[in-house]
Amino acid sequence: MSEQWIFALEVTLNGLMAGVLYALVALGFVLIYKASGIFNYAQGVMALFAAMTLVGIMQGQVPFSHVINALFGTHVTHFGWSVHGFLAILLTVVVMIGLAWLVQVLVMRHLVGQEPIILFMATIGLAYFLEGVADLMWGSEIKTLDVGLPQGINLWIDETTLNWFGYGFFIDNLDIVATCIAALLVGGLVLFAQYTKQGRAMRAVADDHQAALSVGISLNFIWVLVWSVAGFVALVAGIVWGTKSGVQFSLSLIALKALPVLMLGGFTSIPGAIVGGLIIGVGEKLFEFAIGPLVGGATENWFAYVLALLFLVFRPQGLFGEKIIERV
Amino acid sequence: MTDVTDSYVTPDGRTIGGVVMEMNNITLRFGGVVAIKDISFNIREGEIRSIIGPNGAGKSSMLNVISGFYVPQEGEVLFHGKKRPPMRPYEVARQGIARTFQNIALFEGMSVLDNVMTGRLNYMKTNIFQQALWKGRAEAEEVENRAVVERIIDFLEIQHIRKTPVARLPYGLKKRVELARALAAEPKLLLLDEPMAGMNVEEKEDMSRFILDVNDEFGTTIALIEHDMGVVMDLSDRVVVMDYGRKIGDGTPAEILSNQAVIDAYLGVSHD
């Protein structure tokens, strides 16, 4: 095999791995959208919030320490203990469920039956509010997150490919783990949505509120459940992205990369989110590899959006989205 | 005859039991508009009870009070002899009161089978992990629930569309699927809001047959709202007539047909 093809193969593999990470964020959007018809702009911020909470708990940081210090003239920052990663994740899950409950009680419950655009605006508000709360609660420094996920080059792949092609592939261990986590997450979500009573109820609520009530489904409970699941997905995305690039406020911007993924995959399809993520991941890496040098590089910044625009023109429902048919 | 509490047998051989649902002096207001004014009536076990009246008489409001979608300002609702506190619609549904809607409310994105299966949600007792992983009692439970659902699908003759997404079905079949979903909950009381609205003669005949069969086979107590007088008089054991939120008649179809107040208010001129 010529050297160029081997390079392309490595780029493709790396693209697939990056795509998994995009898909992870996009999944959170799809989930809430399918279950409640709300496009949750706050999903990216929720991932940031989850990651910051996780780091904060692990390092034994005092939440709202700046506020406390300013009010009482104290100088508390840390409790002086550190929490094991696994326990901290469990605690963060509890926090995310609490957040879901608050969102439902304080915001969503009062907007039942409103236009989708109103709900969308509410989530924009929620996003900025949550970003502010995250800042106040845990501070704005960049932090490293290490819950014990392996990182660095995978030596086995490096050696094997070196023996085969005479060229060692660089594949990050974290990317491999992220792929496995994403697969588990998707498998779990599919099982949940398709086979459990709560999953069925969730799909029912998304379809028709009145009908759901008439078969004995509590809307309140289902919405808290939906936001909790979205919070959980946000936490997973936050852990993976946080480990990869540090926990910082730009993390909330990864949500923007999820938008082209969703346009490709369709807003209503879980497999769509994954395939969309993979296509964007591979597409932008290959495009950068093949065309990048001709146009001066940095194509990764815009390639995904151009692809999404093309999709909007020719196939607005995305690859897997429900076809938009209107009876006249 | 309405105050007889013990059971009796109808001329066609069905047994009508004691009172299941009792509405006492119900008054429902929307701001200044009085939708229901001081109405009392009861529903007996195993009977087909109809509520009729001109448009805007408050029939649907009445059904919504029974199913918990509206909470009346005055009066009390007794279910199985016990006073029912104000409840949310899903709590009422869990007590065994199922309903259909005037403007069909189905889960359009799901198949017919899935729609009907949602009627069984409150019968699923295994936990989320058992269901997701198909472990323990989950499989047996799903099979039991599917058996009930398949029987109802069979009964209502919708086998051929089992896997079809509901959104693709014609109006008449959607109405039937909605009935199937309500039946899947094995309700103690089934509420039908205009089950034959907008249907052609043939579809109306089918639906009438299904309502009678459901009542006969499963012994389901049914309360329904309907505009078609011929249908109502044929189906019902007893009829409540409403006009401008008041009750103006209550009794067997024969009694209603000879009730002067009803004739004045509703039947008016005969076209036959």
Image (spheres, coloured by chain):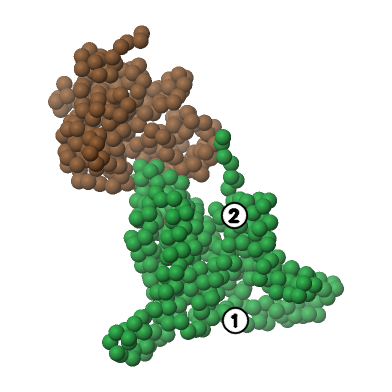
Chain colours: A green, B brown
Q: Is residue A237 above or below residue A214?
A: below
Farthest residue in the front direction?
Answer: B32
Task: State the residue at coordinates (28%, 87%).
Answer: A72
The nearer-to-camera label among 1 and 2 is 2
Residue occupied by mark 2: A266
Q: Position of residue B131 (x, y in %)?
A: 44, 54
Q: Position of residue B32 (x, y in %)?
A: 23, 39
- Quadrant position of residue A277: bottom right
Please tell me how many numbered marks the rendered image carries. Answer: 2
SS type, badge 2: loop
Task: State the residue at coordinates (67%, 52%).
Answer: A313
Check disc 2: other Cα within 10 Å, few if <14, some if 14-19, many if 20+.
many
Residue type of the residue flagged with mark 2: Gly
In the image, B194 versus A164, the foreground residue is B194
Check disc 1: other Cα within 10 Å, few if <14, some if 14-19, many if 20+.
some
Mark 2 — on which chain does it sit?
A
- On residue A212, which mark appears? none
Q: Is residue A180 left or right of residue B202?
A: right
Task: State the residue at coordinates (32%, 26%).
Answer: B55
Q: Position of residue A233 (x, y in %)?
A: 49, 66
Q: In this view, does A283 lie to the left or right of A49?
A: right
Task: Specify whether disc 1 shares its chain with disc 2.
Answer: yes
In the image, A46 versus A309, the foreground residue is A309
Farthest residue in the right direction?
Answer: A2
Residue type of the residue flagged with mark 1: Gln
- On residue A151, which mark appears? 1
SS type, badge 1: loop
Mark 1 — on which chain does it sit?
A
